[in-house]
Amino acid sequence: MEYFGTNLTTHGHYTWDLSGDYMEKIGLMPKVPFDPYTINQNRVKGNVVFCKDFAGFTIIAIEGSCVDTRGGTKSVFWERENISKQEMIERIMSNKLSKSIINAMPFDVTF
């Protein structure tokens, strides 16, 4: 699973690989056919947008960050395959890294 957002301790959005035992920084902007900043824009913190089969990706975008309280922050998770919303949620919540990100958010996330 890949993620665009902050880590658990510092401000600043980066792209991360969450498939291992720790968050591995991939770079600043992901090399994907979508802009993570525009998927979930100007909404209430905790608002969730689900995109299925977006150019072969499944995406869950959450307005807000686990550590950065400024406006315009995002937490975007994706898999490079077409899966259901429920399966994507299960993958996020069964991955210790992505679950830690969700649990650290200072607002409710309603999938």
Image (cartoon, grey):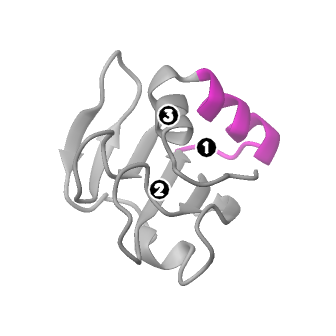
Residues in magenta, as a range: 80-94
The residue sitting at 30% across, 30% down in the picture is 23
**Residue lying furthest front in this view?**
106
- Where is residue 17 drawn, in percent x and y? 34, 35
Mark found first going from the N terminus, 2 or 3:
2
Q: Which residue is mark 3?
A: 98
Numbered tag placed on residue 37 in the rendering: none
Mark found first going from the N terminus, 1 or 2:
2
Q: CA distance from mark 3 to mark 1?
A: 18 Å
**Quick check: 111 left or right of 48?**
right
Classified by dominant secondary structure, the portion drawn in magenta counts as helix
Label 3 CA crowd tier, 10 Å (few <14, some 14–19, many 20+) = many
Helix, strand or loop under label 2 = strand
Is residue 15 depicted above or below 19 in this figure? below
**Residue lying furthest top in this view?**
21
Q: How many marks do you count on the picture?
A: 3
**Quick check: 111 left or right of 1?**
right
Q: Which residue is mark 1?
A: 81
Front label number (3 vs 1): 3
Q: CA distance from mark 1 to mark 2?
A: 19 Å
The residue sitting at 55% across, 30% down in the picture is 99
Please tell me whether residue 87 belongs to the stretch shown in magenta.
yes
- Where is residue 65 drawn, in percent x and y? 43, 56
Label 1 CA crowd tier, 10 Å (few <14, some 14–19, many 20+) = some
The residue sitting at 60% across, 34% down in the picture is 92
Front label number (1 vs 2): 2
Q: Which residue is mark 2?
A: 75
Please tell me whether residue 106 belongs to the stretch shown in magenta.
no
